[in-house]
């Protein structure tokens, strides 16, 4: 495949909003040229020093960019005209009501929707500038570089070791497998708990351990991006926190996109937030994309504020 990786030369984008930083003491009516006047009432007191209506501050160094993406299942349009960027080495959260297309969009990033008969994508999903839906791009290679962790932990009915070694073996990995398995389990914060029972079944682990095993399995093929669809929703609070701590560690080496229904989790764990809603036609669309701090403290859209404060959805 011709996709080029620039990750070796990439720097972590700053997660602060340059427009906010540059104008900390300006009154709100002084806006960047061309900025719009707010069309709606403001529900509660906001930080008056922060400009509200500047266009979305785009990450400097996106790993993935979606442009005008619509996704169809047969004749049904599940999401329409979605555009957002995924900054490298950061955690991007997709939030929004059930049915707004979060999982559909997540699966579009590694071409998993291809496996659903009748699904179709319009628009572009670019990975370091290359459209992943170009005819000459190999979807298997896409899924190696962009791995996925699912809502319900789904270890294979194999040993812990073989779960982690499965992908590398499939890819013809030739180096020291023991080292790779250990490194992956360490990165997934599971090594200490399983190092003495690597031959035991992955299914014999607790739910939280199984989910970390699935993360280790994903890491083992050395992806650049990890997609996680509600990875902690089936877990208890302690395991949930462990997964969040793990994500914070992983973002040093990986780019993460997570779907979550848990607003505290999105606010705590992510750097960037994409808020989706559903139109009258049931198609999901982007309401607002911004740095997580901004979305949760000073959103531009009333709808965002209503959603994050639990007034709908
Ligand atoms: N395989 C499929 N075939 C047909 N329609 C589908 C398929 N998968 C999803 N949809 C539809 O696409 C829309 C978006 O679904 P999706 O699962 O992406 O939403 P979601 O935001 O992840 O919801 P939830 O929060 O409930 O997981 C829904 O209307 C859903 O019914
Ligand atoms: Mg979903």
Image (cartoon, rainbow, N blue to C red):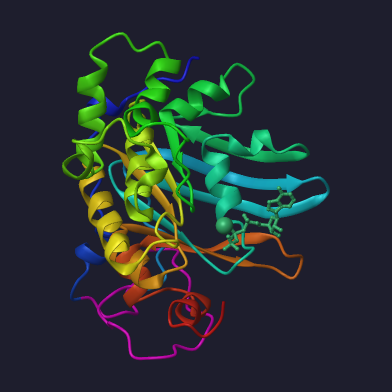
Residue 239, position as x, y percentages in the image: 30, 60
Q: Quadrant of residue 168?
A: top left
Occupied quadrant, residue 98: bottom right
Query: What x and y, as percent, mark residue 244?
Result: 28, 57
In this picture, residue 196 sits left or right of residue 311: left
Q: Which residues are magenta?
A: 26-51
- The quarter of the picture where residue 28 lies is bottom left
For ligand 1, which image quadrant applies?
Answer: bottom right
Total numbered labels placed on residues in the image: 0
Residue 23 sits above or below residue 65 on the image: below
Q: Is residue 128 visible?
A: no
**Magenta-colored stretch includes residue 42:** yes
Q: Is residue 124 visible?
A: yes
Q: Nearer the viewer, residue 244 or 272?
A: 244
In this picture, residue 313 sits left or right of residue 225: right
Q: Which secondary structure class fits the magenta region best? A: loop
The residue under the point 66% across, 54% down is: 79
For the point 35% across and 24% down, which residue is it?
165
| Residue occupying image coordinates x 45% and y 63% | 34
**Residue closest to the eye, 39 or 257:** 257
Q: Tell me: residue 254, above or below residue 260.
A: above
Asked if residue 287 is among those painted magenta in the image, a careful observer would answer no
Q: Position of residue 271 (x, y in %)?
A: 30, 57
Check the image and report above or below for 140 versus 245.
above
**167 over 94 or under it: above or below:** above
Q: Nearer the viewer, residue 85 or 113?
A: 113
């Amino acid at each position: 495949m011709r996709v080029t990786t620039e990750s070796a030369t990439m720097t972590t984008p700053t997660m602060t909003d340059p427009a906010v930083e540059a104008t900390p003491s300006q009154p709100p009516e002084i806006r960047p040229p061309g900025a719009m006047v707010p069309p709606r009432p403001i529900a509660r007191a906001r930080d008056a020093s922060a400009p509200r209506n500047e266009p979305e501050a785009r990450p400097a160094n996106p790993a993935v960019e979606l442009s005008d993406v619509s996704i169809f299942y047969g004749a049904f349009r599940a999401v329409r005209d979605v555009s957002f960027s995924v900054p490298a080495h950061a955690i991007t959260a997709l939030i929004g009501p059930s049915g707004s297309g979060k999982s559909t969009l997540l699966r579009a990033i590694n071409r998993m929707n291809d496996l659903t008969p009748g699904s179709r994508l319009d628009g572009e999903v670019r990975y370091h500038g290359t459209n992943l839906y170009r005819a000459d791009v190999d979807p298997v290679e896409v899924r190696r570089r962009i791995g996925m962790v699912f809502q319900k932990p789904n270890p294979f009915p194999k040993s812990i070791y073989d779960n982690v070694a499965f992908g590398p073996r499939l890819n013809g990995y030739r180096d020291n497998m023991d080292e790779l398995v250990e490194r992956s389990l360490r990165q997934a914060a599971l090594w200490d708990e399983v190092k003495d029972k690597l031959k035991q079944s992955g299914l014999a682990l607790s739910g939280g351990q199984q989910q970390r095993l699935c993360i280790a399995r994903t890491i083992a093929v050395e992806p650049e991006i990890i997609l996680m669809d509600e990875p902690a929703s089936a877990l208890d609070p302690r395991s949930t926190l462990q997964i969040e701590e793990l994500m914070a560690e992983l973002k040093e080496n990986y780019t993460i996109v997570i779907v979550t229904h848990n607003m505290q989790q999105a606010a705590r764990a992510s750097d960037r937030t994409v808020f989706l809603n559903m139109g009258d036609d049931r198609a999901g669309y982007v309401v607002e994309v911004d740095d997580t701090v901004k979305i949760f403290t000073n959103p531009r859209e009333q709808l965002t504020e209503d959603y994050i404060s639990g007034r709908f959805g």
